[in-house]
Amino acid sequence: SIGFLSADDLFGAFQIITKPSGADVSLYDIDLYLCKTPSPVYPVMIDEYMVLQEGIPGRKINIIITKDGYVPLKKTLFVPFLYTKEKEALKHPTVYSCSAMSLS
């Protein structure tokens, strides 16, 4: 028998790494401080904000990375929903790394 995944069954996860580390990461749209880099692994569950990118379901997350002495960096991350179990997504996060943050 063939089973189909429901939209409630999809998860992704992400982690942010910067060089140099110790940068502050905030969610841009809601101006919420998230963490210092390297970040922990954050789970993302499918919800009404899901988008398709090249046919892959996922979620776009707008962040801003700041560090004293560096120009703030605004990025849109795409976190693909690749797993049916949150535990699996947390084991295999999509890692976003930023190096060479420009000096201000």
Image (cartoon, rainbow, N blue to C red):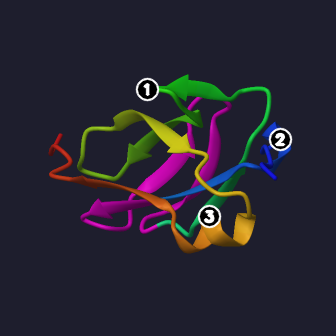
Vertical side of 8 occupied by 39: above or below:
below
The residue that mark 2 highlights is 6
Q: Are marks 3 and 1 in contact (CB under 8 Å)?
A: no
Q: CA distance from mark 1 to mark 2?
A: 20 Å
| SS class, disc 1 | loop
What is the total number of numbered labels drawn onto the structure image? 3
Q: Residue 20's x, y, as percent?
A: 24, 65
Residue 49 lies left or right of residue 98; in this view the side is right
Vertical side of 100 occupied by 93: above or below:
below
Could you tell me which residue is drawn at 79 percent across and 35 percent down? 47
| SS class, disc 3 | helix
Residue 13 lies left or right of residue 100; in this view the side is right
Q: Quadrant of the C terminus?
A: top left
The residue that mark 3 highlights is 89
Magenta-drawn stretch contains 48:
no
The residue that mark 1 highlights is 54
Mark 1 neighbour density, 10 Å: few (under 14) some (14–19) many (20 or more): few
Choose the circle earlier in sequence order: 3 or 1.
1
Q: Which residues are magenta?
A: 16-38
Compare residues 24 and 47 and report the one nearer the observer. Answer: 47
Mark 3 neighbour density, 10 Å: few (under 14) some (14–19) many (20 or more): many
Q: Are marks 1 and 2 in contact (CB under 8 Å)?
A: no
Question: In the displayed image of the protein, which residue is found farthest to the front?
Answer: 1
Choose the circle earlier in sequence order: 1 or 2.
2
